[in-house]
Amino acid sequence: MKTSIYLVIGIFFGIVMYKSEAASWFRIYEMFRFDSFHMYGIMGSALLVGILSVQLIKRRKWRSFYGETIQLQPKERSFARYLYGGVVFGLGWALAGACPGPMFTLLGAGYWSILVVIASAVLGTFVYGLVRDRLPH
Amino acid sequence: MEYILQPWPWYVTGPLIGLTMFILLLVGKNFGMSSNLRTLCTICGAGKKSELFRFNWKEQRWNLIVVVGTIAGGFIGAHLLSDGTAVDINPRTIAELKSLGFQSAGAAYLPEELFAPGALFHLKSLPLLVAGGFLIGFGARYAGGCTSGHAISGLSNLQFPSLLAVIGFFLGGMLMIYLLFPLIF
């Protein structure tokens, strides 16, 4: 039962990623050049719905469908890790034109070359794990 | 049906992405796609090499199922719900891309020059895709999240660290496009 819920959420998300063109390398390039409102509209309106839903959950103290309290973990305080990590991520995002969600969407859409990006992203994650202690956080 | 087959406007898809996060919260989970990259490392045995990968990956099974759904959703979106692949970007952007050598700009979903299967054998494309993926994976874990975890989940919860991360995403992206692209392409 739970499995099928996650599957449906994923399918929904994958369709939205593809149809919004947020999974298009061209849209990402256009966004970083500030040539279109499209991606900013997507993120801004997603955020508006997101902020409202988080406020709703917090103020009404909503519980999950399974009766658990909904955990909204605050992010750990730091400066360096978010800024440096963010820059590294942004360099890759602009080059490959896909972030971790769209990568999988593109695989389903039949762009097999994206497997190279996915495998390299797993490798990048692994290497981060190896050198983590030597980086400023 | 015609509306469905065309690209969906931002004011429809943006709220639907927010809704995805909301539904996940309601079933008790936090929206974040890059965690799956870490989980995949753990499944491959990376726990032997770093503390980061020592956790019970079965707790993240639900997220891997979301990934399987996302792949299926990509298939449905591209093959059942679309009648073309051209992405209608700004003509100015198209001209700029053509001057960099991307002839497929404005006529495809992804640049053929990088993603067409044949392009993998070009001297340039393969290393670029490897580098791009590597930076994404490394950066997402370093920053503790990607676009979904920070730009959507984190900012929705008004987290200052997520704002820093998103500023970092844009600094990195602009560095790549304005400074490095003219050198690479």
Image: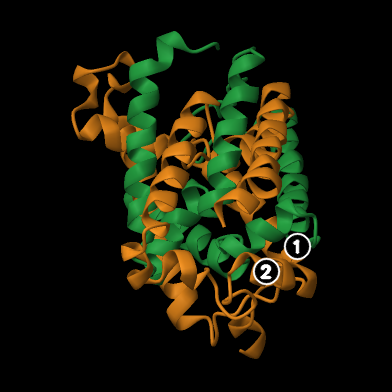
Chain colours: A green, B orange
Q: Which residue is more in the foreground, A27 or B52?
A: A27
Identify the disc placed on residue B164. Answer: none
Q: Is there CB contact under 8 Å for labels 2 and 1?
A: no
Amino acid tagged 1: His
Residue B130 position (above or below residue B113)? above
Give x and y (percent) for residue A133.
41, 9
Q: Which residue corresponds to mark 2? A: B99
Q: Which residue is more in the foreground, A30 or B95?
A: B95
Give x and y (percent) for residue A85.
56, 26
* Residue B60 appears anywhere in the view: no
Residue B2 position (above or below residue B171)? below
Q: Quadrant of residue A16?
A: bottom right
The subunit letter for the residue under badge 1 reads A
Q: Quadrant of residue B6?
A: bottom right
Q: Residue at x 67, y 31 (%)?
A: B168
- Label 2 Cα neighbours within 10 Å, binned few <14 / some 14-19 / many ≥20: few
Identify the disc placed on residue A38. Answer: 1
Q: Which residue is more in the foreground, A49 or A124?
A: A124
* Residue B118 appears anywhere in the view: yes
